[in-house]
Image (cartoon, rainbow, N blue to C red):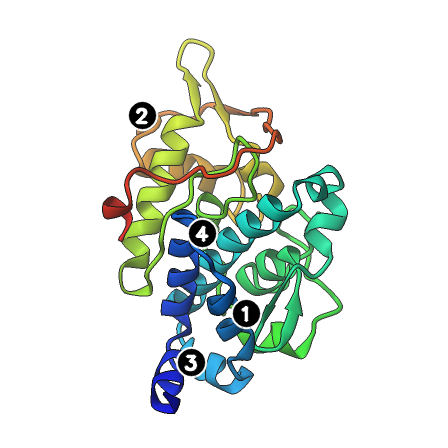
């Protein structure tokens, strides 16, 4: 039993995947949550060395716990500020908020309302230790905060993260972009405005749309940011489980 526990604790990425699978299929996830809380910070750090491992782990954790918390206490969604800033989960003995995961760990300690340009000033040792070394803006097409305009939830794996993030970005931008060639205007998700610095500005946003063939290669349209629907929508998963595993 002890060897089994050591083996599980050495694979936090698998624990995060198992948690999300349990949530997806309505299974009891308390035991997995306990395992995640009891991982030592040292084991977590040694198991999540690369940015790909960190992104896969923390995106799955974020998406799973959003579902867990809001299914248990849907009233918390009424106060968005409190919901995202108060600790809602425990990983490796550390109480964490959703904002700490998104803006601290996954966005390398950036301010929530700085449009992706301003760094945070108060950074915990846990955040500094476990955050990514480089921000990948495609993560914004993977995180699901249970709003209707959020990207669907998928199961992320570090070994194929680049392919998965490309797919997530392409699918989301294809569905949430409105291009009007006659007006030389493209309407894009407000996500890219809120995190403009992560996307490295207007021309990088247009380059991203061209990369995924959302707009023509020779286009240089004006950008309009579309409204974001904050209505709560739970259980928004991408396709069938077999397509995500």
Label 2 or label 1, whichever comes before in sequence order: 1
Look at discs 1 and 3 and give the one toward the viewer. Answer: 3
Task: Describe the element under mark 1 as helix, strand or loop.
Answer: loop
Distance from the alpha carbon under mark 1 to that under mark 3: 19 Å
Contact (Cβ within 8 Å) of mark 1 with mark 3: no
Please rate how many residues cluster around mark 4, counting C-alpha atoms within 10 Å: few if below 14, some from 14 to 19, many from 20.
Answer: some
Task: Describe the element under mark 4 as helix, strand or loop.
Answer: helix
Distance from the alpha carbon under mark 4 to that under mark 2: 40 Å
**Residue 131 bears which disc, if any?**
1
Label 4 or label 1, whichever comes before in sequence order: 4
**Nearest the eye: 39 or 32:** 32
Q: Is residue 239 left or right of residue 185?
A: left
Where residue 23 appears, as percent x and y from the top left, is 45, 52
Q: Which residue is mark 2?
A: 216
For the point 39% across and 14% down, which residue is it? 181
Label 1 or label 3, whichever comes before in sequence order: 3
Q: Which residue is mark 4?
A: 23
Q: Which residue is mark 3?
A: 9
Quarter of the image with the N terminus in it? bottom left
């Amino acid at each position: 039993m002890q060897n089994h526990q050591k083996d599980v604790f050495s694979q936090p990425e698998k624990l995060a995947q198992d948690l999300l699978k349990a949530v997806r299929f309505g299974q009891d996830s308390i035991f997995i949550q306990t395992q995640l809380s009891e991982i030592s910070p040292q084991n977590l750090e040694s198991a999540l060395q690369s940015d790909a491992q960190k992104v896969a782990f923390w995106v799955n954790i974020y998406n799973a716990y959003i579902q867990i918390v809001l299914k248990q206490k849907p009233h918390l969604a009424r106060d968005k500020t409190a919901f995202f800033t108060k600790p809602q989960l425990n990983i490796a003995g550390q109480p964490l908020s959703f904002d700490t995961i998104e803006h601290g760990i996954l966005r390398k300690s950036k301010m929530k309302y700085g449009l992706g340009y301003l760094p945070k000033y108060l950074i915990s040792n846990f955040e500094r230790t476990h955050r990514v070394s480089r921000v990948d803006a495609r993560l914004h097409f993977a995180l699901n905060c249970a709003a209707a305009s959020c990207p669907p939830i998928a199961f992320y794996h570090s070994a194929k993260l680049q392919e998965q993030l490309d797919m997530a970005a392409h699918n989301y931008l294809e569905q949430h972009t409105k291009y009007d060639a006659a007006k030389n205007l493209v309407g894009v998700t407000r996500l890219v405005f809120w995190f403009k610095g992560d996307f490295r500005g207007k021309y990088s946003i247009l380059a991203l749309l061209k990369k995924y063939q959302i707009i023509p290669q020779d286009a240089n349209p004006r950008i309009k940011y579309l409204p974001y629907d904050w209505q709560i929508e739970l259980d928004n998963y991408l396709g069938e489980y077999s397509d995500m595993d």
